[in-house]
Amino acid sequence: MEEDFQLFIDDAEENMQNAIKHLKSELLKIRAGKASPNMLDSVFVDYYGVNTPLARTANIGVSDARTIVVQAWDKTMLIPIEKAILKANLGFNPRNNGDIIIINVPVLTEERRINLVKSVKNVCENTKISIRNSRRECNEAFRDLKKEGYSEDLVKKGENEVQELTNKFVKEVENLLDKKEKDIMTV
């Protein structure tokens, strides 16, 4: 009997962990003023007729806190990569020197920092909603089991366990939000 409840709890926990993984990947894409190869994750290049992620066509690295360096595996791809970076509308102005593409990450203005924090809060709120939806689905499954004759004590115990998981993951979202907000607002 308790195995049924544990399956639902494990499923909810897995969904919540996936929501956190997604949040972390989304937060990596939001720049905080420091150069990071992840800033180019949303860039896709026309690689011989196939829309390909930039990371699969070149090495991406940082040479200092404000400079991203893109070294194409095929030098003929430098111009398409440069165009793809411009097309991605990330606010970067890439320079092609014939061997590599150099991107200077501009310093964020106060207004831009505030907008980025709002964006981060939005992404975090969506993650919290996803976590709460996992809790709701699990609780609905518990109520269905109760209708099938499972004890009310088991249902209550299951609901409490899922609430503890929810609290744990929402707190993790809050911690990630605080960390990213400090990162963005640090000049």
Image: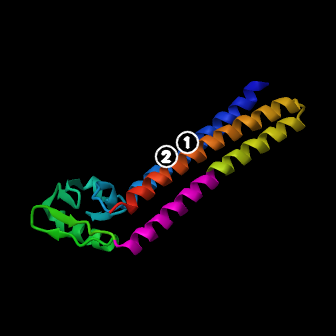
* Disc number placed over residue 52 in the picture, else none: none
Assign a secondary structure to mark 1. helix
The amino acid sitting under disc 1 is Gln
Please tell me which residue is depicted at 67% across the width and 46% down the height of the picture.
134
Relative to 66, is 17 on the left or the right?
A: right
Picture quarter with the N terminus: top right
Residue 182 in the image, given as x and y percentages of width and height: 42, 56
x and y, in percent, of residue 179 in the image: 44, 51
Q: Is residue 26 left or right of residue 60?
A: right
Left-right relation of 171 to 58: right
Residues 15 and 158: in front is 158
Cα distance, mark 2 to mark 1? 6 Å
The residue tagged 2 is 21
Which one is in front, 133 or 106? 106
Q: Residue at left 88%, top 29%?
A: 151
Magenta span main SS: helix
Residues in magenta, as a range: 109-130
Instruction: Give amino acid for label 2.
Output: Lys
Task: Say if 21 sits above or below 48 in the image.
Answer: above
Work out whether 64 lies above or below 114: above
Tell me the crowding category of disc 1: few under 14, some 14 to 19, or many 20 or more residues within 10 angstroms, Cα based. Answer: some
Q: Are marks 2 and 1 in contact (CB under 8 Å)?
A: yes
Residue in the picture at 20% in, 59% down: 70
**Of helix, strand and loop, which one carries label 2?**
helix
> Per the image, is 128 magenta?
yes
Residue at mark 1: 17
Magenta segment: does it hold 178? no
